[in-house]
Image (spheres, rainbow, N blue to C red):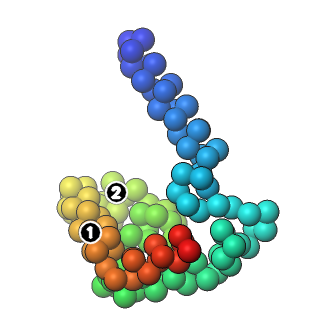
């Protein structure tokens, strides 16, 4: 590893730390002092909206896959681990995830969730 690679890695690490410190201002989601609210909205309400989006936009297999990758309500699993569990290649899992994200991006409930977060 040469100096340039170390410099790039350090810059990436610094950028990620800055992004974490400024999380609320960058993404429109601001944590409050209350651990049960997120930008003035109860966290359980936000969870319900996300669960509703996933349930309405995705079939059961897609829903389970995205939840496992993100660790939502279950143990987080890597693409490699999921591919091995299902007996398919990592590329197939990655393709499925791209398709899932596109479905979510273009679903009507995604717009409602965005409006809810940016009210």
Q: In terms of image quadrants, where is residue 117?
A: bottom right
| Residue that mark 2 sits on | 79
Q: Tell me the quarter of the image containing the N terminus.
A: top left
Secondary structure of residue under mark 1: helix
Q: From the image, state whether disc 1 or disc 2 is nearer to you.
A: 1
Q: Residue 56 at x, y = what percent?
A: 37, 88
Q: In terms of image quadrants, where is residue 65?
A: bottom left
Q: In terms of image quadrants, where is residue 108?
A: bottom left
Left or right: 107, with 7 as reference point: left
Q: Tell me the quarter of the image containing the C terminus.
A: bottom right
**Residue 26 visible, this angle:** yes
Q: Residue at x 66, y 69 (%)?
A: 38
Q: Residue at x 54, y 51 (%)?
A: 26
Disc on the earlier residue, 1 or 2 = 2
Q: Residue 31 at x, y = what percent?
A: 68, 61
How many numbered marks appear? 2
Q: Residue at x 49, y 27 (%)?
A: 11
Residue 48's mark?
A: none
Q: CA distance from mark 1 to mark 2?
A: 18 Å
How would you rate the neighbour count of disc 2 (Cα within 10 Å): few for under 14, some for 14-19, many for 20 or more? Answer: some
Residue 102's mark?
A: 1
Left or right: 90, with 60 as reference point: left
Callouts 1 and 2 close, C-beta under 8 Å: no
How would you rate the neighbour count of disc 1 (Cα within 10 Å): few for under 14, some for 14-19, many for 20 or more? Answer: few
**Residue 87 visible, this angle:** no
Q: Residue 40 at x, y = what percent?
A: 69, 73
Which one is in front, 36 or 64?
Answer: 36
Q: Residue at x 78, y 68 (%)?
A: 34
Which one is in front, 50 or 83?
Answer: 50
């Amino acid at each position: 590893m040469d100096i340039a690679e170390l410099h790039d890695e350090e810059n990436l690490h610094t950028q990620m730390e800055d992004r974490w410190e400024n999380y609320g201002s960058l993404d429109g989601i601001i944590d409050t002092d209350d651990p049960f609210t997120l930008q003035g909205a109860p966290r359980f309400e936000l969870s319900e909206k996300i669960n509703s989006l996933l349930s309405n936009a995705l079939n059961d297999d897609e829903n389970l896959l995205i939840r496992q990758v993100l660790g939502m309500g279950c143990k987080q699993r890597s693409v490699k681990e999921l591919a091995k569990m299902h007996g398919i290649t990592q590329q197939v899992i990655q393709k499925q995830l791209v398709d899932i994200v596109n479905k979510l991006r273009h679903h009507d409930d995604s717009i409602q969730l965005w409006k809810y977060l940016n009210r």
